[in-house]
Image (spheres, rainbow, N blue to C red):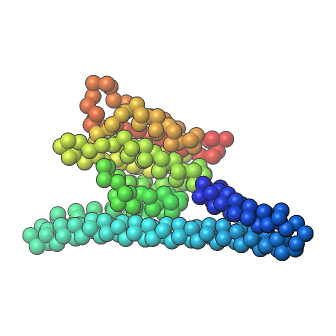
Amino acid sequence: MSRRLIVRTVGAALSLILPALAIAFWADAVWPLVLFAAWTLAAASAVVATEQRDARRGRERAIEAMRNLTIDTLKHHRHDWMNEIQILYGYLKLNKPDKAIEVVERIKRHMANDSRMSRLGTSKLITYLLSFRTTCNTMKLEVEIEEDFDLTGGPDRSAFADAVIGLVDAVREQSKLSAAGEENVLQLFFRSTESDILLEMKYNGMIAARDSLSFGLERALKGVGRLSEEDRLPDSEPAGASRRMIVAFPLKEQAG
């Protein structure tokens, strides 16, 4: 029960003091009982109606926020595609077909990788990854999915989505902009083997606290997967050096 609902319920209950006093003063009369019953019904109805109204407004705000996020995500992707098209157009104008072909091949790889996003199992994870650019300004996220990637036999898809989102958030929380304005980049590479679903994470950029990052990664997994490999930086390394982590999500047969 929310604090707001508790306050409203307590307020409605306190308002019953008035009809209760009427019953006490006019104990032999019937109308105080009728008043008390009607007051109770009205107070309860007011609490329920107000809660329903707030819930409806909350849903409307959530829908509006999702719409805005979708629009912003589409704008970013449109900007990326327009950049590629302009580069392609420039090479064609310069009569450099080899360079133009390279751009076309790059576009094809991006399109194929985006289509493989559906293999990640849940719309929650897919939406999170696709819209990341619109919600984070301290880190760039690049996602690559192996051509034959398959979650079949892997962990619960909802738990897998929560774990991956938690891992990315753990890195995002420790990423910070450098004084020189250099971009932080986190690369995710999803692949599957006979025994595990593997997520390779490569981070290149500034890290606020390396020890806190390791703790955050372990906490994000919640027992669903394990940090099977991590290239830890020695204390002498600068905070902006690269870091590589591999997370394994065992298949159910292997976990059992």
How many dots with numbers?
Answer: 0
The residue at the point 76 percent across, 67 percent down is 19
Q: Is residue 249 visible?
A: yes
Pick the quarter of the image with the C terminus. top right
Relative placement, left or right, of 114 versus 39 is left
Residue 20: image location, x then y, percent? 79, 63
State the residue lying farthest toward the front: 25
Based on the displayed image, in which of its 4 quarters is residue 103 positioned? bottom left
Based on the displayed image, in which of its 4 quarters is residue 80 positioned? bottom left
Vertical comparison of 211 with 200: above or below: above
Most foreground residue, 118 or 163: 163
Relative placement, left or right, of 247 versus 222 is left
Most foreground residue, 61 or 202: 61
The residue at the point 39 percent across, 49 percent down is 188
Residue 194: image location, x then y, percent? 55, 46
Most foreground residue, 106 or 27: 27
Q: Is residue 59 visible?
A: no
Vertical comparison of 105 with 246: above or below: below
The residue at the point 48 percent across, 68 percent down is 61
The residue at the point 51 percent across, 71 percent down is 60
Residue 85: image location, x then y, percent? 22, 70
Relative placement, left or right, of 38 versus 168 is right
Residue 254: image location, x then y, percent? 62, 41
Vertical comparison of 191 with 72: above or below: above
State the residue lying farthest toward the right: 28
Pick the quarter of the image with the N terminus. bottom right
